[in-house]
Image (cartoon, rainbow, N blue to C red):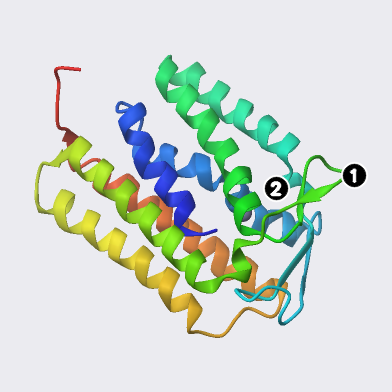
Amino acid sequence: MFIGHFAVGFASKRFAPRAPLVLLLAAPLLSDLLWPFFLQFGWEHIRFVPGITRYNAFDLYDYPWSHSLLMGVVWATLFAAIYFAFSRYHAGAITIWIGVISHWILDWITHIPDMPLYPGGGPKLGLGLWNHVAATMIVEIVMFVVAFYLYWIATRTRDWIGTYACIAYAVVLLFLFVGARFSAQPESVKQIVVPGLITEAILLAWPAWFDHHRVLRTTST
Ligand SMILES: [Zn+2]
């Protein structure tokens, strides 16, 4: 899943309005943020098997540190605890915790059975939405559009950056998601790690920037 994880981050603003958007996005993205590093370090592995799902060629046979349910709980608790230590904001910490866990649940719906429960073997789960290309596209796009709208109405702009940089971000994400369907699939770890890290940096710096140019719409709650 790709923009579906961003959807969780945008929707989170409703539940933790005082938390910065960049952290609300980083939480549901955390497993995928860690993954390129762990691939690079050789702690996790991927194979490329054309046709393994209709959606992509990823044989995700070994990624328990970024993508097991148990490690999801560990990362979620760490992230939420560190956030709470700095912010003392309960709603933010709880939303971040749920956000990190949501990654496993959404990937479990999307992936074929490759999602581990814990590192070191054990059953692997996955409902395989990726075998249905149109359904994958529709589910992720609908999730994203609804969640972006929730963020949009929970906040209001202070200036043109808050309007246009925010809209442009949503458009670019949709474009990346749809565009990936019609472009060459990565075929090596290198083609995932370097573009992955660059994309991560941009896709987090950008919302950090425009979120500063938007304020909460209501002060009554
Ligand atoms: Zn993932």
Labelled disc at residue 67 = 2
* Pointer 2 residue Cβ closer than 8 Å to ligand 1: yes
Q: Nearer the viewer, residue 97 or 193?
A: 97
Say few, some or many: other residues with alpha carbon within 10 Å of mark 1 (under 14 / 14 to 19 / 20 or more). few
Left-right relation of 64 to 173: right
Tell me residue 205's x, y (percent).
38, 51
Which of the marked residues, 2 or 1, is nearer the chain's N terminus? 2
Say few, some or many: other residues with alpha carbon within 10 Å of mark 2 (under 14 / 14 to 19 / 20 or more). many
Compute the Cα span from label 2 to label 1. Answer: 12 Å
Tag 2 and tag 1, C-beta contact below 8 Å: no
Give the position of the C terminus as an image quadrant: top left
Q: Residue furthest left?
A: 159
Tell me residue 10's x, y (percent).
35, 44
* Pointer 1 residue Cβ closer than 8 Å to ligand 1: no
Labelled disc at residue 120 = 1
Q: Residue furthest right?
A: 121
- Indicate the quadrant of ligand 1 in the picture: bottom right
Tell me residue 161's x, y (percent).
16, 53
Tell me residue 175's x, y (percent).
36, 72
Q: Residue at x 57, y 48 (%)?
A: 106
- The amino acid type of the residue labelled 2 equals His
The answer to whether 163 is drawn above or below residue 86 in the figure is below
Q: Nearer the viewer, residue 197 or 1?
A: 1
The answer to whether 182 is drawn above or below residue 204 in the figure is below
- The amino acid type of the residue labelled 1 equals Gly
Q: Residue at x 33, y 67 (%)?
A: 172
For numbered disc 1, what is the local secondary structure? Answer: loop
